[in-house]
Image (tube, rainbow, N blue to C red):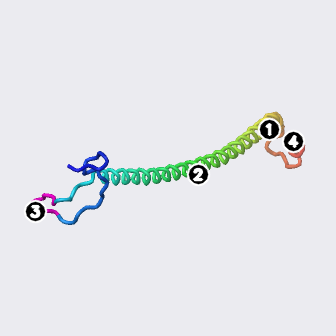
Amino acid sequence: MRTLQGLPERFSGDWRVPAGHGAGGQRKAGERMDVGLILVWFLAGATAGWGVTSIRAARAWSRAREQMIREIRVWQEETQRFKARADQLAQERESWVAGVKQGRDDAITMVPMLIAAQQRLMGLGRTARTGQLDDCA
C-alpha cells in the first residue's frame, strides 16, 4: 500500500473518481473511495441543514412573538374600553341610586298630603267640585 506523507492511500487527498466500475461490483485498479471527501460533504450538508433549520425556526419564533405582541395590544385596548364602560356604568348607577332616593323622599313627603286631601274629600262627600280641590296641593 502506497502512502503520501504517512497516510494510507485512501486518505491521500486525490479526490478524482475514475470512471467505470469493473464487473461484479469490483473496483478497477486506481479506483478508490475517498472517506475524507465523504466526511467533508456530510459535514457541509449537516451544517447547511442546521443553518436552514435555524433560520426557519428564528423566523417562526419572530412571527409568533409579533403575533403575541399584537394580541397583547388588542387585549390592552379591550381592557381600557371595558374599564371606561365600567366607570360609566358606575356613574349611571350612582345617579340611579340618587334618583331613587330622591323619588322615595318625595313620595314620603307627599303621602301625608295625599292622606290629608283624601280625608278632606271624604269629609266633603262625593259632591265636591274641582274648585274645592285646588287648595289640596
Real-space Cα distance between discs 2 and 1?
48 Å
Nearer the viewer's eye, disc 3 or disc 4? 3
Q: Which residues, given as a range, are shown in magenta?
A: 21-28
* For the residues bearing labels 3 and 4, Cβ distance under 8 angstroms: no
Picture residue at 25% right of the left edge, 51% below the top: 10
Q: Nearer the viewer, mark 1 or mark 3?
A: 3
**Image quadrant assignment for residue 116:** top right
The residue that disc 4 covers is: 136
Q: Amino acid at mark 2?
A: Arg
Report crowding for label 2: few under 14, some 14 to 19, many 20 or more residues within 10 A (C-alpha). few
Distance (Cα) linking label 1 and label 3: 112 Å
Residue 15 in the image, given as x and y percentages of width and height: 30, 58
Q: Secondary structure at mark 4?
A: helix
Q: Which mark is residue 23?
A: 3
Q: Nearer the viewer, residue 102 or 111?
A: 102
Q: Earlier in the sequence, mark 2 or mark 1?
A: 2
Q: Nearer the viewer, residue 10 or 68?
A: 10
Contact between labelled residues 3 and 1, with CB atoms less than 8 Å apart: no
Q: Nearer the viewer, residue 79 or 69?
A: 69
Query: Where residue 66 sits: x, y (%)?
Result: 56, 51
Q: Amino acid at mark 4?
A: Cys
Amino acid marked by disc 1: Gln
